[in-house]
Image: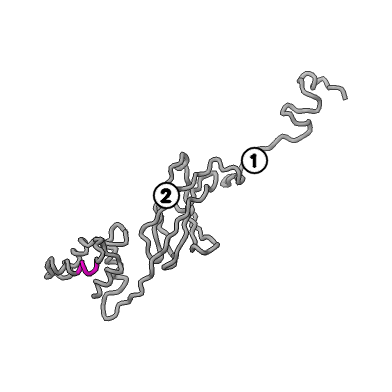
Amino acid sequence: MPPTEDSAESGLPPHQSPDGRPSGMDSPTEVVPAKGEHLQISPGDKKGVPNPPHDLRSSDVAATCLKLTWQMKNKNACNVTYYVIKYKPREAKTWAEISGAFTNPYDVKDLSPFTEYEFAVLAVNNVGRGELSEPIFITTRKESTWEPDDSDITLDELKDAFRLFDTDRAGYITTDIFKEILQEIEPEWDEDDLMEIICDIDCDGSGTIDFEEFVKIMIG
């Protein structure tokens, strides 16, 4: 077919549109997400999602709970909407997930006592989920099996008393603070009496007393 007048004027080969496609072919359509939805990013295109959190750490490890902290230093950290915490017993195949963690540090609860867990964290922004952080492995503490016998003090009361002095939630109190507690309980004890008690408990000389040691002292 000879070139038409229009194609001749445009300088394009016949049957070819200005964008280089054969005439009659539909133009590409831009995919726009509906309100409240995000575009799905292919595995090979992670542009715009947050980088993995780093320096994941634990503290305040107890029998059924612990605290996690992490750091973000990439340029889009300020655009993070929330974090997702994934965890499981080390030998398990299925992950549990806490989605919508808005605080850092974050308290993870309802864990099993004396169990080794694997934890990892990822960040989410309006583009999608980022990659998981490097995992860490944490073993929860044994659950205390002590129950009061011939005493009016309950285990819950002892926990409340311990938390009252463990203001940093570090899982221990210093021997100096504990000396003050003993002086309140038995004002007639002198310095030698107090130091004898402290030395019996703090055998390694660390200067700290954990909850189990605290219970042993309080119930005699």
148 left or right of 189? right
- Taking the spot 49% from the left edge, 48% from the top edge, the residue there is 123
Identify which amino acid the numbered label 1 is placed on: Val
Mark 1 crowd level (few <14, some 14–19, many ≥20, 10 Å Cα)? few
Extreme residue toward the bottom, this view: 150
Q: Secondary structure at mark 1?
A: loop
Q: Are marks 1 and 2 in contact (CB under 8 Å)?
A: no
Few, some or many C-alpha atoms within 10 Å of disc 2 (few <14, some 14-19, many ≥20)?
few
Q: Position of residue 140 (x, y in %)?
A: 41, 64
Residue 218 position, x and y percent, is 24, 72
Q: Nearer the viewer, mark 1 or mark 2?
A: 2
Say which residue label 1 marks.
31
> At x 42% / y 60%, what residue is drawn?
138
Q: Which residue is mark 2?
A: 55
Residue range highlighted in magenta: 197-201
Quadrant of residue 7 in the image? top right
Vertical side of 26 occupied by 126: above or below: below
Viewport quadrant of the C terminus: bottom left
- Give coordinates of residue 147: x percent, y percent: 32, 76
Q: Residue furthest front?
A: 204
Is 198 one of the magenta-colored residues?
yes
